[in-house]
Amino acid sequence: NAGVMQNPRHLVRRRGQEARLRCSPMKGHSHVYWYRQLPEEGLKFMVYLQKENIIDESGMPKERFSAEFPKEGPSILRIQQVVRGDSAAYFCASSSGVPEAFFGQGTRLTVV
Amino acid sequence: AQSVTQLDSHVSVSEGTPVLLRCNYSSSYSPSLFWYVQHPNKGLQLLLKYTSAATLVKGINGFEAEFKKSETSFHLTKPSAHMSDAAEYFCVVSGGGLTGTASKLTFGTGTRLQVTL
């Protein structure tokens, strides 16, 4: 049973470009969470999705950020018009509906 | 609302000595509590979890934690540290909604464990 898969592992974008981060949850998991980790900081909750629905987006910046988890395919975190402050590690986690969540290896976004 | 406070940002121990990483939580509901470990430039690995069963929880690599409701604490311990334990440790609380259902995880700020010879 493969774990949570995130790709790409590393992503470099120029300011103003779009960043698209993908997360495939563990088999059988329909709950996905996205977290952001800034250098030397803990993980900050961004959004919680359950197949085709956003359950909690209280941690998402109001502009430029969006997330989806379609019926088929991976969950996508999209950042439009990236700025240097978006540089961070973005982690995805999945669960089967119980509190325990399993994390992916993360995508390290660098904005130059 | 829920929150987690990790009382030490850095802990340094000698190899072979006990480890204590402290965590206090706040939750409006009966919480689920977790400890995750993150090695440099790696993802997060679940060490152990408390979900309203036994209050003393055993995890991987010899770690354990005790849930103390009266003290709202969930401290992580290990009898004897190993060099490979050097990493960042996060205390996490879940349960902003119904116990036993999925909800967002709230992370503490982390404790960096250093293990010296």
Image (cartoon, coloured by chain):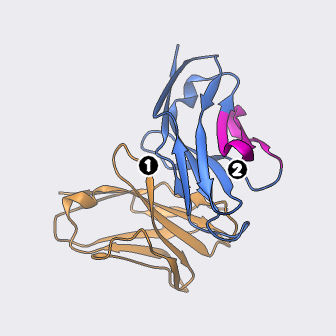
Residue A3 vertical placement versus B66 (above, below): below
Name the amino acid, label 2. Lys
Locate residue B39, reporting x and y percent.
Answer: 49, 39
Residue B49 numbered tag: 2
Residue A42 numbered tag: 1
Name the amino acid, label 1. Gly
**Does the rendering let one see residue B68?**
no
Check disc 1 and report its element: helix, strand or loop. Answer: loop
Same subunit, tags 1 and 2 = no
Q: Is residue B82 left or right of residue A47?
A: right
Give the residues drawn in magenta, as a range: B54-76
Residue B52 vertical placement versus B102 (above, below): above
Chain of residue at mark 2: B
**Quadrant location of the N terminus of chain B?**
bottom right
Q: Are marks 1 and 2 in contact (CB under 8 Å)?
A: no
Furthest residue toward top: B117
What's the colour of chain A in the image?
A: orange
**Does the rendering let one see residue B97?**
yes
Chain of residue at mark 1: A
| Residue found 64% across the figure and 62% down from its top | B28
Chain letter matching colour blue: B
